[in-house]
Each structure stands twice: as structure tokens, then as C-alpha cells.
């Protein structure tokens, strides 16, 4: 290294030190959207425990794997899952090319806006809609469609793009963990090809750290001599309930030391995380705030939190009371 | 940030600058086990192209995804795949618990050392052996078994542990790419649960960056109240040939800009990599060195390199001639 490049490195380091000053100021405020309380204290204690060199609770950075559910944990999932809102809009957008849908269940119900009739079509109806809207195109075409939809779609109550309806306290937690050497992953029942369109921009989580439900793909040589991957209708992994630990093992191959969810679909992921040796953090977001967001748990069809809530209480897992623990819900909130 | 911690940061930066001096010296030597030639020059040019800020060929670090086949690209695959050697040894180790194997094909052939008879059992026989040795235990039990085997097993010709029979020039290339902001992945036909036991120690590639063939897993609550993941015999993904781009999309979700393989099983991975926009690097290790390692290509049953070699020549991909391009094969070589 020449003395010139040495000085350049030194200057860069000084700039980096200045940035660290700024970061330290931000950090001194801790997790600003979290009220002081048991949940915030549990997070701070856990991070201190695993990052203090020499402590018996220290965990090397490579093993600081943190996994987060997406729907209802990082962003809004009411009144319907965002990906399902996308699927319904796609059915409407594709309807002109499928005149037969006007008289074919479950598409006819969606086109008439009769959600009760659609609900009556059950899982079979849902699978037909997913196949019609999530398969039969290349992975790149699908990603483009999702990106275009996200740019235009608005949440029915908040009239905001879905990407703005993420939880500010969880964004802070993701950043806080990464500052402390954690690698943050999403482990969600949502489709992996759907989520990867926005996770890097919105959460700072790159595509390769997104675990989700997956469908079969077929490699085909295009007519222009360029290969494509076609999305098929067959499901490969439903990354929910017991599928979450399976997804973690298959994609990450290392047991997390921190897991955050919000529903019974996250129970096995939290159990799998809890069963490892050494310090562990298991957290659940409890939606208790009908005014700023929604209030739902044991009786909800979407994001039902019942058995996992009982287990959390019995085992001392951290339950975040949205109303009490968060002084801000969305980044746009004052 | 206090002035004390500012000074601490500054001191750390100065140490970091010193380390950079050392790294620069090492780097000035380039890739020491690579002889000067077209292959080495192509690597150096590609890395310079994608890392030069402001250049039209510049690629942001987040998109510097590099994928490597394992068997025959990073470590030895002759005279049989290492994982297959493991499976054969496991059949012998488990035989006392399976007295029926003495008279049951294909196990009887393996126990008698009659590899011709075993080969005659074809893919069905291979699947039976894989099911008997790779399924029916927890993921942790399997990983322990692999680790114990790797510690004791020796390569039949070199009489060395397999973990020492990795290619020194490729270790240097992995490190060189990571120094330049690349994220290095393995994308191999080998089993993901097998490879993850050693990839971090041997290649510096963590479990979450290993893509491989996967089998089904079942989440079960253990009798001690702790959940386990059981390895099942059903195959989930064969991460070879057209399965490689599928594995890349499913696990990484981003198209690589560099891909290295050594056989026809890597052809589609290289085609998928080549089809992206911007600078690309496609490489093949050609085993041409019977003296220091092995010489094989178009006629080999293991690691056959035929169609991919033709395509590489036609499209100007980099073909590494082991004998000509590497002045050292294994780390233990003088």
C-alpha cells in the first residue's frame, strides 16, 4: 500500500468515525419508538448478553441469527393479507382475458365482490386463485407485476401504499440487531417471490435472507436463447406452522437465537428457537391497538394468536402489547 | 459518543489501516497459486470491472453474488463423490443392526465390496442406500455422524482427510472475491445437510450460503418437550443440471454475476448466470492433471464435462486448465 492510499484509508476511517458519532447518538436513544417497559428491557438485556465479549452468554456474530415473521409482525395483515389483496386485484386485472371466469367459481365471486361466496370456496378456491395469479409466468415477469401493483395499491383503511404500513418499532429493532452483528432473516408464510420484491428496500433484508412459501419452478430455454424460470402452480413448501422450522433448517441451516412472530403460525418457529442452548429471545407482537392499527387475537381468522399466546405466557416469552409498548406504529405516525 | 470512545474508534481505525497494508501486500501477490495466463487474467479483469466505482461495469456490493459448485470445483470428486464414500461407509457401519442386508440388494453388493453389482442396481439402488444412510435420524444426529466420519475417513489414493483435498487456487479465489465485496455461495448437487458440516470451516462459507440437494424434513416434538427435525427419505430438490438455477432462485433470489463449475451438471447454472445484464464471469475447472490430481472430462461417469465444455468454448467462458493454470492443487502441496 502506498503512503497515498494509506492516507486515503485514514481519511475514510475518520469519516467513518464521524458517522459512528452520529450512529452512537441515534443508539443512545435506544429504540425510540419503544416505550420503556418489560418488552424493551428484555430486548436490550438480550442483546447486551449475547454481545458482551467474555460473558458466559456471549454468542459469536456468525451465530447471531434473528428470524422475523412478516405479515402482522413487520407489516400490516388486516383486513386481509397484503398478498391476498394482490391476488384479488390480479384476478380483476386478468378477467378480460378470461371471459369464462364470469361464470366459473371461485372467480365469479371475486369479480362480483362477493367475498362470502369466495370464502365458501375454501382452500380449493384459494389455491385456484393463487395458481391463476402466481403461476404461468417467468419469475421476472411476476416480480415486475408485484412491483407495479405495490406502487399503485392502497390499503383500504389507511389509504397508504402497503410499503408505508410497516411497523416503525420493528424497523428500529431490525436495525438495532444488525448494528449488533445480527443477521436478520424473514421467515414468513408469504410467498418468497412476492416478498423479495420489497424486503430489501423496506426492511434492509436482501433477497437471500428471505425464507417463505415456495412454488415449483421450471428452467426453460427461451426462444431468444436466454433461459427463463417459469413459476408453476405446484406448491413446494408452505412456510407456516411446522413448515417454519423446516424452512429455517432448509434455507438457513442454523438455529436462530432470536425469533419474532405474532400468530399461532409462528409457534413452532419460536419453539424451535427456544430449544437451542444458550441465551434465546422469543417475541410475539400482540395486536391490541384498534385505534392506531387493529386489535385481534384468539378469534381472528387472520393472524390468530391463541395457542402461541398461552405458550408465551407459560414460558415467559416476550409479548409486545402494541398499544402499551409502542409510542409509534407506522413511520408516518406523528 | 464521548471523546474517549471517539479516540478508541480512531485507534481501531488505525489498526484497521495497518491490517489493510498487510492485506494489500497479500493482494499484490494476486492469486499466488494461479499461474499467469488467460484464466487468471480473466478473473482479475472481471473483479476490477465490477468493483471500480464510476465504471459503466460497476456492480453494487449487494449484487456481487458468486456461486460455486462443490464436487470437482472446490474439492476432489474422484474416484467417487465424497458423500457417496460416506454413504458406503455408513452402510458398513450400520450393517450389524441390519442382518437382512447380507442378502438384500443393493446392500449385499456393498458389504461384499462388489461395486459392479452395486452399479447394476442403478438409480433405484442408489436411492435405497441414500434413504438408509441419510434419513431416519434428526438433523443434529446426521450432522454429528458426518463430522465424526470426516474426522476419520481418508481418501483412498492420497490417504488424507477429505477436508484437506480442497483446491488451494479456489480457496484463494473465494477469499479474493470476498475481499472485493462478493458474497460467496455454494450451489451443489451434494446434500445440503452434508455440506454444511464443513463449508464454514473449510471454505469460510456459512451454512446459510450453502445451496444443495434437499430432502423432506418433519418437525416433531420430542419426548423431552424439545422439538426435533427428522430427515425423511423423500427428495425435495435435486440441485443439479436444471435444478441449479431453480436452487439459486429459490434460495438466493438474485441472479449471480459469477459462476464456477466443472461438469455438465453446472451447464444450466452457467447459462442462467450468463443471461443477466452487465458483466458476467462463467468458469469451468477442467481436470487435466493426472499426476497431481485426476484427468477426466467427456468420458467420465463422475463429473462428466462434455456439453458444457463445448458451450464454454463456443461462448468464450473461462476454462481453467488445472495442469497449466494452477501451480499448486491442494494446500498440502509444496
Image (spheres, coloured by chain):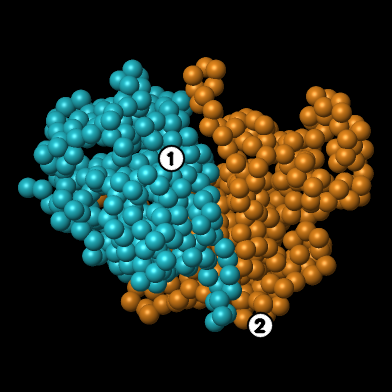
Chain colours: A cyan, B orange
Does the rendering let one see residue A200?
A: no
- Residue occupying image coordinates x 52% and y 24%: B221
Does mark 2 fall on the same chain as mark 1? no
Provide residue B254's location: percent of width, then percent of height. Answer: 45, 62
Q: Which mark is residue B197?
A: none
Please give left or right for residue B197 compared with residue A309 in the image: right
Task: Look at mark 2 in the image and give the residue it sits on.
Answer: B314
Q: Residue furthest front?
A: A103
Quadrant (top left/top right/bottom left/bottom right) for the C terminus of chain B: bottom right
In the rendered image of this protein, does residue B146 appear above or below residue B21?
above
Provide residue A45's location: percent of width, then percent of height. Answer: 27, 28
Task: Look at mark 1 in the image and give the residue it sits on.
Answer: A240
| A305 or A260, nearer to the observer | A305
Q: Which structural element holds mark 2?
A: helix
Q: Chain of mark 1?
A: A
Q: Which structural element holds mark 1?
A: loop
Does the rendering let one see residue B87?
A: yes
Provide residue A103's location: percent of width, then percent of height. Answer: 39, 61
Please give left or right for residue B268 compared with residue B295 in the image: left
| A11 or B133, nearer to the observer | B133
- Residue occupying image coordinates x 58% and y 56%: B187
Q: Chain of mark 2?
A: B
Quadrant (top left/top right/bottom left/bottom right) for the N terminus of chain B: top left
| B29 or B229, nearer to the observer | B229
Amino acid at each position: 500500500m502506498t503512503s497515498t492510499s494509506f492516507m486515503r484509508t485514514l481519511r475514510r476511517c475518520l469519516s467513518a468515525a464521524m458517522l459512528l458519532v452520529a450512529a452512537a447518538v441515534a443508539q443512545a436513544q435506544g429504540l425510540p419508538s419503544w416505550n420503556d417497559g418489560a418488552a424493551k428491557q428484555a430486548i436490550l438485556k438480550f442483546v447486551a448478553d449475547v454481545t458482551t465479549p467474555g460473558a458466559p452468554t456471549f454468542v459469536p456474530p456468525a451465530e447471531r441469527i434473528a428470524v422475523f415473521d412478516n405479515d402482522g409482525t413487520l407489516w400490516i395483515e388486516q383486513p386481509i393479507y397484503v398478498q391476498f389483496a394482490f391476488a384479488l386485484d390480479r384476478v380483476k386485472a386478468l378477467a378480460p382475458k378470461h371471459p369464462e371466469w364470469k361464470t366459473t367459481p371461485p372467480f365469479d365471486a371475486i369479480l362480483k365482490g362477493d367475498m362470502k361466496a369466495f370464502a365458501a370456496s375454501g382452500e380449493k378456491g384459494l389455491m385456484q386463485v393463487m395458481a391463476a395469479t402466481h403461476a404461468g409466468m417467468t419469475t421476472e415477469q411476476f416480480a415486475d407485476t408485484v412491483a407495479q401493483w405495490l406502487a399503485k395499491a392502497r390499503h383500504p383503511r389507511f389509504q397508504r401504499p402497503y410499503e408505508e404500513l410497516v411497523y416503525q418499532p420493528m424497523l428500529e429493532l431490525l436495525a438495532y440487531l444488525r448494528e449488533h452483528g445480527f443477521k436478520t432473516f424473514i421467515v414468513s408464510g408469504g410467498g418468497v417471490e412476492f416478498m423479495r420484491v420489497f424486503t430489501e428496500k423496506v426492511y434492509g433484508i436482501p433477497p437471500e435472507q428471505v425464507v417463505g412459501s415456495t412454488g415449483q419452478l421450471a428452467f426453460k430455454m427461451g426462444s431468444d436463447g436466454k433461459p427463463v424460470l417459469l413459476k408453476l402452480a405446484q406448491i413446494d413448501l408452505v412456510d407456516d406452522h411446522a413448515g417454519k422450522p423446516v424452512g429455517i433448517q432448509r434455507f438457513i441451516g442454523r438455529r436462530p437465537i432470536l425469533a419474532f412472530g405474532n400468530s399461532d403460525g409462528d409457534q413452532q418457529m419460536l419453539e424451535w428457537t427456544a430449544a437451542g442452548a444458550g441465551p434465546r429471545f422469543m417475541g410475539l407482537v400482540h395486536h391490541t391497538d384498534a385505534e392506531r392499527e387493529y386489535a385481534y387475537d384468539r378469534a381472528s381468522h387472520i393472524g390468530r394468536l391463541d395457542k402461541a399466546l398461552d405458550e408465551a405466557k407459560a414460558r415467559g416469552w416476550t409479548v409486545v402489547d402494541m398499544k402499551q409498548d409502542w409510542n409509534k406504529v407506522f413511520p408516518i405516525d406523528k
